[in-house]
């Protein structure tokens, strides 16, 4: 067996490997790689294992990040919820993860960061730097069947939203992506978080709208869009991915997010998807965790690993609640135009 790095845009064997592995996702696809490369200019660095017949039997999607602020590193894969090592034979994961370390040491490409589900067992040299929840809903063949999985609170909130006369609108135009982005920035500002640059969303639109995989769902109150969500329905993985959402402060009083999730599920049924991936949730975000679970979602743990480990002191410094609180406060006070500019400057260094 031989390990090497490839650019999957020029090697069709990667697509064949992705199709053959049960734990593949949108984040392993060539389309998602194009979103990341077009948005941030990172270089693809997909590590693969080929057998004696030159057939790929394992792979790890990653990019090279080179920043004057945060240094050089290999990340699998930037701005993705997870990027599990995929193999035709699950028993290869540990062996291949060790080969990845050895290859990166040999090519002087370290450090490495990878996020994957806990059932993707890596060698012990990888150290966990953080963990998050991942929630997904198994899609049934009708909304009547799905409603049986909803908690009483979810059903109650849907009824409240309907009584308030909220309207739902579907779109996939670039102009509406721009309006969705405004909702997204508003929500990020409210939470004291930097927004991704609009060019990232523009790249998502360019790649997935042309394939008829993209939906923007808006909730309208009194003629005004108060909340929205961006979803991608990927038939290759039979999964809808709820990627980003945004809302005005008033949306919570109308139970707008409940209607959004309801229609994500409904749209997944219409598109013939089998799973709705609700993305990551911070371990300490109990409210969002409860919100996702009330739709009958199953949860798993995503761990972010680092090699070599940068040290406990640095990890604790970055994660200290007091530091986060100060940063969130200052970001929440920035004008939206400044926040977007800062996000555009900072995000390429965060990959």
Image: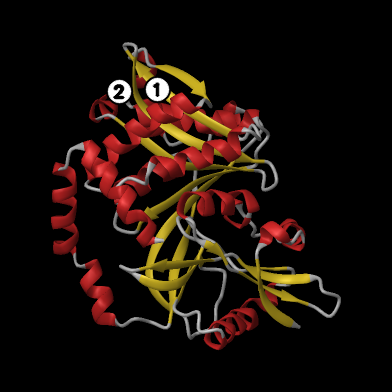
Q: Residue at x 67, y 61 (%)?
A: 8
14 to 122, vertically: above or below:
above
Per the image, the residue denoted by label 1 is: 219
Q: Is residue 22 visible?
A: no
Quadrant containing the C terminus is: bottom left
State the separation of the CA atoms marked 1 and 2. Answer: 10 Å
Q: Is residue 320 visible?
A: yes
Label 1 neighbourhood size at 10 Å, few (<14), some (14-19), many (20+)? many
Q: Residue at x 64, y 28 (%)?
A: 270
- Tell me: 158 left or right of 107: left
Along the polypeptide, which appears first: circle 1 or circle 2?
A: 1
**Residue 276, located in which quarter of the rendered image?**
top right
Q: Position of residue 283 (x, y in %)?
A: 34, 59
Q: Position of residue 236 (x, y in %)?
A: 70, 46
- Marks 1/2 in contact by CB < 8 Å: the verdict is yes
Looking at the rendered structure, the secondary structure element under dot 1 is strand
Give the numbered dot on residue 254: 2
Q: Position of residue 135 (x, y in %)?
A: 48, 50
Q: Position of residue 83 (x, y in %)?
A: 55, 62
Give the numbered dot on residue 320: none
The label nearer to you, 1 versus 2, is 1
50 to 343, vertically: above or below:
below
Looking at the rendered structure, the secondary structure element under dot 2 is helix
Q: Nearer the viewer, residue 51 or 72?
A: 72
């Amino acid at each position: 067996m031989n390990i090497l790095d490839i650019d999957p845009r020029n090697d069709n064997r990667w697509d064949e490997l992705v199709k053959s592995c049960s734990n593949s996702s949108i984040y392993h696809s060539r389309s998602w790689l194009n979103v990341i490369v077009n948005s941030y200019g990172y270089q693809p660095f997909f590590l693969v294992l080929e057998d004696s017949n030159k057939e790929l039997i394992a792979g790890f999607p990653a990019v090279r990040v080179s920043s004057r602020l945060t240094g050089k590193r290999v990340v699998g894969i930037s701005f993705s919820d997870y990027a599990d090592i995929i193999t035709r034979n699950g028993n290869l994961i540990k062996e291949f993860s060790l080969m990845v370390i050895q290859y990166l040491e040999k090519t002087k490409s370290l450090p490495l960061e990878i996020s994957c589900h806990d059932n993707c067992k890596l060698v012990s040299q990888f150290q966990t730097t953080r963990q998050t929840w991942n929630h997904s809903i198994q899609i049934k063949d009708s909304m009547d069947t799905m409603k049986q999985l909803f908690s009483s609170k979810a059903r109650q909130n849907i009824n409240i939203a309907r009584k308030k006369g909220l309207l739902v609108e579907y779109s996939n135009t670039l102009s509406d992506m721009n309006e969705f982005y405004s909702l997204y920035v508003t929500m990020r500002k409210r939470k004291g978080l930097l927004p991704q640059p609009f060019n990232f969303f523009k790249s998502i639109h360019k790649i997935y709208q042309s394939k008829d995989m993209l939906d923007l769902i808006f909730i309208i109150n009194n003629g005004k869009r108060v909340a929205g969500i961006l979803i991608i329905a990927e038939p290759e993985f039979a999964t809808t991915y709820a990627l980003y959402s945004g809302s005005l402060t008033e949306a919570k009083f109308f139970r707008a997010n409940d209607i959004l999730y309801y229609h994500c599920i409904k749209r997944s049924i219409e598109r013939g998807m089998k799973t709705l991936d609700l993305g990551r949730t911070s371990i300490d975000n109990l409210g969002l965790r409860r919100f996702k679970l009330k739709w009958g979602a199953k949860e798993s743990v995503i761990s972010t690993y680092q090699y070599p480990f940068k040290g406990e002191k640095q990890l604790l410094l970055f994660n200290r609640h007091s530091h986060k609180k100060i940063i969130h406060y200052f970001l929440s006070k920035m004008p939206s135009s400044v926040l977007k500019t800062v996000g555009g400057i900072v995000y390429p260094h965060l990959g």
